Amino acid sequence: RPRLDRLKQQHDEATSTTATLGGCEKDQLKAQVSKLEGDNQKLVHQLAGLETTASRAEERRRKAEQDLDRLKQQYDGAMSIIETLNVQNASLVKEITETKQKLGANSAELKRVNRQLTDANSMIEKK
């Protein structure tokens, strides 16, 4: 922007000076003015491109923030599910441990009853 203002100032100075100079100098100044106007057009075009780029970057930034918010919500939801599963898992581990203990006791009881049946069978066969 400062360069654009400087070019406009140079253009204005060249235009006011043109009125007081001779023909040859006027032609040179007109050429300079023409060049400055061309440079000015290029700068205006570049500025428009930069504004478009900045606008697109801002749009991408807003979308990225929205995506980040969505991902944070998904993460929080997943962590909540994990906490619930951990509580359920602890309960299941306790239940499995108790069931294993009962199965161990039942197995010992089955072995004892099986021995008794085997002994009783042997006694029956001996009679």
Image (cartoon, rainbow, N blue to C red):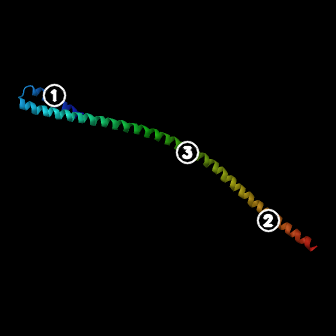
Tell me if residue 102 can be seen.
Answer: yes
Give the CA distance from mark 1 to mark 3. 66 Å
Residue that badge 1 annotates: 12
On screen, 55 above or below 99?
Answer: above
Q: Earlier in the sequence, mark 1 or mark 3?
A: 1
Looking at the picture, tell me which residue is in the foreground, 94 or 38: 38
Q: Please indicate whether residue 13 sits to the left or right of residue 113 in the image.
A: left
Give the CA distance from mark 1 to mark 2. 112 Å
Quadrant for the N terminus in the image: top left
Q: Quadrant of residue 29?
A: top left
The answer to whether the residues at label 1 and label 2 have Cβ atoms under 8 Å apart is no
Tag in front: 1 or 3 = 1
Q: Which mark is residue 65?
A: none
- Residue that appears at 76% across and 60% down: 105
Q: Earlier in the sequence, mark 1 or mark 2?
A: 1
Q: Which mark is residue 111?
A: 2
Identify which amino acid the numbered label 2 is placed on: Lys
- Crowding near the residue tagged with mark 1, few <14, some 14–19, many ≥20 C-alpha atoms within 10 Å: few
- Crowding near the residue tagged with mark 3, few <14, some 14–19, many ≥20 C-alpha atoms within 10 Å: few
The answer to whether the residues at label 1 and label 3 have Cβ atoms under 8 Å apart is no
Q: Tag 1, which secondary structure? A: helix
Q: Please indicate whether residue 1 sits to the left or right of residue 94 in the image.
A: left
On screen, 43 above or below 107?
Answer: above
In the rendered image, residue 8, in percent from the top left (x then y), is placed at 19, 30
Give the CA distance from mark 3 to mark 2. 47 Å
Q: Tag 2, which secondary structure? A: helix
Q: Earlier in the sequence, mark 3 or mark 2?
A: 3
Identify which amino acid the numbered label 1 is placed on: Asp
Q: Which mark is residue 78?
A: 3
Looking at the picture, tell me which residue is in the foreground, 103 or 29: 29
Identify which amino acid the numbered label 3 is placed on: Ala
